Amino acid sequence: MSKTVNGNREFYIATANLLNFANPNRIYYGNASAYTDAEYNHKLRGITDLLSKAHADIIAVQEVWDSDALQELAVSLGFSPEHVVAPLASNDKSSPHTHGKGATETPAVGIISRFKQLESHLLEEVEPKAVIDIPDVGPYERFSRPPLLLRVEAYGQPITIVTAHLKSKRAFFLRDDNGKLLEDMDNPDIRVRAKLRSLCMRAAEAASIRMSIIERLRHTREPLILLGDMNDVTSSVTTQLMAETGEVNYDKSMRDVALFDAAHIQSRYGWMKDVAYTHIYQGMPEVIDQMFVSEEFLPDSKFSLGQVERVDYFNDHLKWDYADRVIDHGIIRAKIKLHH
């Protein structure tokens, strides 16, 4: 819970992949069954139970199909329906994006925030200088799952929140307009080429997000937080393409536009790094859900407006049997304290 007890201005911010969170009795993927009312209620209760322990004031979410479901989750967590922003999953018939049908073909991202909303927009088109040709596909010009930018006011301080869900590592095989496979998935050379396509797509998305962030941060003192499911580890080329943390080692002026891994700059950093994982991929635990902050949250910056007090990973549910998991990613939560 956000609070100003004893004058403290602090809040919790979290990110969670909700694993195809959709309204009951609606087909979201053609090859997946709709949730029955009982299955939906089980998923809603399970996600509520996990997120309620995070006490977050801002929650970035991924894999949402319907804003109605997300609003119901928000209310169960003590938020109001108007605290939900998920334009590409909207069930409002007046929505220019969805005409009330929710997300189609692929799930969307969203943000729940109890703070006043100042501005929101989607990053739908890949920045022209980040567009690359995907092998056998052509120019990659639009995000498959557009990131969402929401600017909020926390205790009088404007903060920009960007949540993303980048292209997965899953091989991208060519299909016709009806979704019929055009390639031999068992051919090892084709499989490698299909994974290369996914990597190129994720790289273009990461580069585009980076360019949008640079534009946002350049010569300003307004903080920014980037968080979400990046589908690769913190040190990966694509994730660092978004953050450019390492550039600061060579050029201190890069601090103005670089982003910093919240887990590495937390003031109580220590044993948590040894239990940090948010996903289990082919039997190996890894951190692919991340949170990055701008220079204004570095305690040693002359422009510091606050600091990341601690970062927690909620991942015990990943040890449960698959049938018992309502989500298949861990939850990351940071406690951020603003200066007076």
Image (cartoon, rainbow, N blue to C red):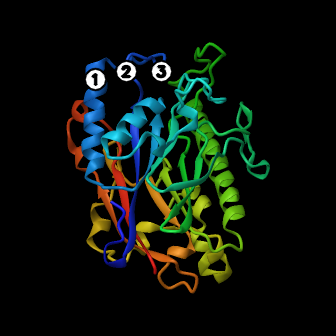
Relative placement, left or right, of 150 versus 30 is right
Which residue does the image show at 48% across and 16% down from the upper left?
A: 30
The earlier-in-sequence mark between 1 and 2 is: 2
Q: Amino acid at mark 3?
A: Tyr
Instruction: Please name the residue that numbered disc 2 is placed on.
Output: 24
Q: Is residue 163 shown above or below 141?
A: below
Please tell me whether mark 2 sits on a helix, a strand or a loop: loop
> Label 1's element?
helix
> On the rendered structure, is 136 left or right of 76?
right
Q: Residue at x 66, y 15 (%)?
A: 177
- In space, the residues marked 3 and 1 are separated at their CA atoms by 16 Å
In the image, taking residue 190 as reference, residue 68 lies left or right, namely: left
Identify the residue under disc 3: 29
Measured in 3D between alpha carbons, the distance from the residue under mark 2 to the one under mark 3, in whole angstroms, is: 13 Å
Determine which residue is flagged by label 1: 39
What kind of element bears circle 3? loop
Please rate how many residues cluster around mark 1, counting C-alpha atoms within 10 Å: few if below 14, some from 14 to 19, many from 20.
Answer: some
